[in-house]
Amino acid sequence: QKEVEQDPGPLSVPEGAIVSLNCTYSNSAFQYFMWYRQYSRKGPELLMYTYSSGNKEDGRFTAQVDKSSKYISLFIRDSQPSDSATYLCAMSANNYGQNFVFGPGTRLSVLP
Amino acid sequence: DTGVSQDPRHKITKRGQNVTFRCDPISEHNRLYWYRQTLGQGPEFLTYFQNEAQLEKSRLLSDRFSAERPKGSFSTLEIQRTEQGDSAMYLCASELAGERDTQYFGPGTRLTVL
């Protein structure tokens, strides 16, 4: 079993839909959680960064962390075609970038 | 454009050749990371620098790989005697130490080893 699992998709939704992207993990020591967006042929872009359990909202994006279930989610409201990308989760027990473990990514297509 | 640049963007080489990639981070960022990403996978940590000091190397970084960051500015990643298994996207990221929300990735260098 991989340390971080993520549904690879592809996930296709109509424009305006609410998108839910999820990751599960096995290491209970993880405390720092991030979501990245990666467009084709580009590097990942940090979208959300959260510590421990709870919710964090930024515009159309909401990140949720449930440490008791070892489950994190990223919700995208009013999805746009420009949201079409691969979404990667990443997590770590500490705040050191060298220790972050990335999921394999979920490819999302938002259809106009 | 994130402010982190990488050169070249693509590199095709024959097995056994040496290749070198360059990363120019955001100028005030003191921490620089190298990652490798293969198709359908997330980035895997290779090594990182704080200023000019290389502080950690992953087990993925075999002795054919070497990285430098002279004067704490740009960084280079060299792969000697390339193998087909080295084919991947090599990503560089920079940040202010300890400030995760300042992290920015470059566009990557895609390496193809024939």
Image (tube, coloured by chain):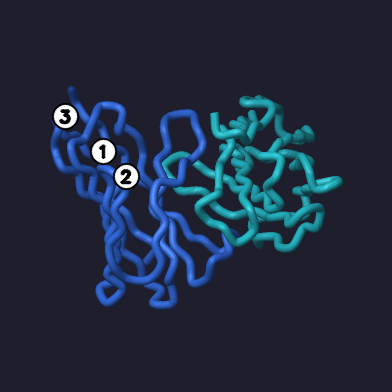
Instruction: Give the mark toward the camera: 3 or 1.
Output: 3
Q: Earlier in the sequence, mark 3 or mark 1?
A: 1
Please state the horizontal and vertical placement of residue A2, each as a whole percent of the image.
40, 63
Residue under the point 73% across and 57% down: B50
- Please give the label number shown on residue A15: 3
In this orientation, which residue lies closer to the viewer: B94 or A10?
Answer: B94
Label 1 CA crowd tier, 10 Å (few <14, some 14–19, many 20+): few
Residue B60 in the image: state x and y as whole percent. 64, 56
Mark 3: secondary structure: loop
Q: Colour of chain A?
A: blue
Q: What residue does disc 1 label?
A: A10
Q: Which residue, as the protein is rendered here, is positioned at the far right?
A: B71
How many circles with numbers are drawn on the protein? 3
Residue A64 located left or right of residue B7: left
Chain under numbered label 2: A
Q: Colour of chain B?
A: cyan
Badge 3 sits on which subunit? A
Circles 2, 1 touching at the beta carbon (< 8 Å) = yes
Residue B56 lies in quadrant: bottom right
> Which of the image's four quarters has the C terminus of chain A?
top left
In the image, what residue type sits under mark 3?
Answer: Glu
